[in-house]
């Protein structure tokens, strides 16, 4: 019987392939980590989007707090103090804030001919809503809507310019959305 002389070629090949396999594994781990971060960031951006939408709904739902005396220079701010935001129920990290004001420059074009013949006046309001979530995710939406009220409402002037005291509440008001625009800071 002849003995073969082993020269250790398998060991040398394994020692060469081991660093290559290690580099591939580390690279795959880094890629997977970045993909998870991107997916989480997309989720937080969506949550910020939903928080801004929630803020718009809260602003429109305020009803009696919709006041034509809120102007661009003196809007209704929610929350009243700057630098803070309100939490969204059921979410520990998502918050919102908004600014609401009367837009006297609008021409009342949101009133359909049927509404105008029924004797309704339209007041145009604008909501600038901000939603926030984790990792600095933020989204800003601007929503306009009209509030309709009967012409000649008892005690009210025919034109509400934001100065008259009798325009402070709009009884029987029916908010109606007019436009939607997203300001995306990404």
Image: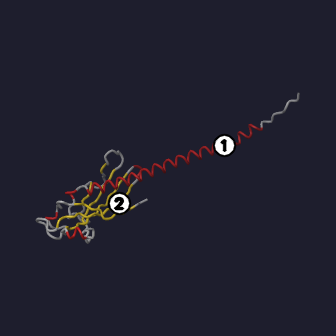
Image quadrant containing the C terminus: bottom left
Residue at horizontal 25%, vertical 60%?
175
Q: Quadrant of residue 12?
A: top right
The mark found on residue 129 in the picture is none
Position of the N terminus, as image quadrant, is top right
- Crowding near pointer 2: few (<14 within 10 Å), some, many (20+)? many
Mark drawn on residue 19: 1
Q: Nearer the viewer, mark 2 or mark 1?
A: 2
Tags 2 and 1 touching, CB below 8 Å? no
Element at badge 2?
Answer: strand
Q: Which of 72/153 is in front?
A: 153
Of the image marks 2 and 1, the number of the one nearer the N terminus: 1
Residue 143 picture location, percent across and down: 32, 62
Q: Secondary structure at mark 1?
A: helix
The front one of 20 and 100 is: 100
Count of numbered tags? 2
**Residue 26 vs residue 121, the one in the foreground:** 121
Up-down relation of residue 170 to residue 43 (above or below)? below
Q: Residues within 10 Å of mark 1 (few under 14, many from 20)?
A: few
Mark 2 highlights which residue?
141
Residue with the most extreme top position? 1
Question: Seen in the image, is 178 located left or right of residue 14?
Answer: left
Q: Is residue 52 above or below residue 25?
A: below
């Amino acid at each position: 019987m002849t003995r073969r002389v082993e020269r250790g070629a398998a060991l040398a090949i394994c020692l060469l392939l081991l660093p290559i396999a290690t580099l591939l594994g580390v690279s795959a781990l880094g890629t997977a980590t970045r993909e998870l971060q991107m997916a989480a960031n997309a989720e937080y951006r969506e949550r910020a989007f939903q928080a801004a939408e929630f803020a718009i709904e809260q602003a429109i739902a305020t009803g009696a707090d919709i006041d034509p005396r809120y102007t661009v220079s003196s809007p209704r701010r929610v929350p009243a103090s700057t630098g803070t935001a309100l939490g969204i129920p059921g979410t520990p990290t998502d918050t919102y804030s908004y600014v609401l004001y009367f837009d006297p420059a609008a021409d009342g074009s949101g009133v359909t001919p049927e509404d105008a013949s029924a004797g309704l006046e339209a007041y145009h309001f604008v909501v600038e809503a901000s939603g926030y979530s984790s990792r600095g995710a933020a989204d800003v939406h601007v929503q306009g809507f009209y509030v309709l009220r009967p012409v000649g409402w008892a005690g009210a002037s025919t034109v509400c310019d934001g100065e008259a005291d009798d325009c402070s509440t709009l009884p029987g008001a029916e908010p109606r959305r007019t436009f939607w625009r997203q300001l995306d800071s990404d």
